[in-house]
């Protein structure tokens, strides 16, 4: 069965700060680029968002998917099965539960494997995703990362 490759990267200007994600979907010779910026977020949220958006963009279920990411946070959380333990414990004391829950809704729809790649190491797709993510963070039309901003405003009260 043919497989889909998804390349991802996330970025935050200062952390937290303006952020963005970049995702490239590759199926045979076909490629699709996705990116979006946010006015206040974190690098880890954008790394995870890049993966989620890539998986959510697939129009068929049951695909073999390889996700390439330079984020140890994302790759290890899934490949070492930490996220499934977090889910069992209701994500108690874990960061980004909203995004992990969103990830866990789409993850079972496919046969997904993660591969970690070293960032900024001249890998053409990783480099392109980095450009997409940073351009999105630096661009206009920034979205509000509502869950993150609500959480941060609540934390500022204490």
Image (tube, rainbow, N blue to C red):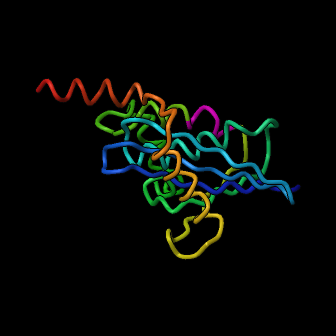
Using residue 9 as the reference point, say whether residue 88 is left or right of it.
left
What residue is at 34 percent from the left and 39 percent from the top?
Answer: 95
Judged by its main secondary structure, the magenta piece is helix
Observer-nearest residue: 75 or 42? 42
Would you place residue 27 above or below residue 117 in this image? above
Using residue 115 as the reference point, say whether residue 137 is left or right of it.
left
Counting from the top left corner in percent of width and height, residue 54 is at: 66, 44
What residue is at 67 percent from the left and 36 percent from the top?
Answer: 56
| Picture mark count | 0
Using residue 139 as the reference point, say whether residue 15 is left or right of it.
left
Q: Within the magenta stretch, is there residue 157?
A: no
Counting from the top left corner in percent of width and height, residue 129 is at: 59, 57
Would you place residue 129 above or below residue 53 in this image? below
Which image quadrant for residue 85? Answer: top left
What residue is at 56 percent from the left and 36 percent from the top?
Answer: 104
What residue is at 52 percent from the left and 50 percent from the top?
Answer: 135
Segment tinted magenta in the rendering: 103-108
Observer-nearest residue: 62 or 20? 20
Counting from the top left corner in percent of width and height, residue 57 is at: 71, 38
């Amino acid at each position: 069965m043919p497989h889909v490759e998804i390349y991802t990267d996330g970025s935050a200007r200062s952390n937290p700060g303006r952020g963005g994600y970049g995702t490239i979907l590759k199926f045979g010779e076909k490629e699709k680029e996705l990116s979006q910026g946010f006015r206040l977020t974190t690098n880890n949220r954008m790394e995870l968002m890049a993966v989620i958006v890539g998986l959510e963009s697939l129009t068929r279920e049951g695909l073999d998917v390889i996700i390439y990411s330079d984020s140890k946070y994302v790759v290890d959380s899934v490949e070492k099965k930490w996220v499934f333990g977090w889910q069992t414990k209701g994500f108690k004391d874990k960061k980004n539960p909203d995004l992990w829950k969103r990830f866990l809704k789409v993850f079972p729809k496919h046969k997904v494997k993660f591969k970690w790649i070293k960032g900024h190491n001249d890998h053409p797709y990783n480099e392109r995703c980095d450009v997409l993510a940073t351009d999105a963070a630096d661009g206009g039309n920034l979205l509000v990362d509502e869950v993150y901003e609500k959480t941060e405003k609540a934390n500022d009260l204490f």
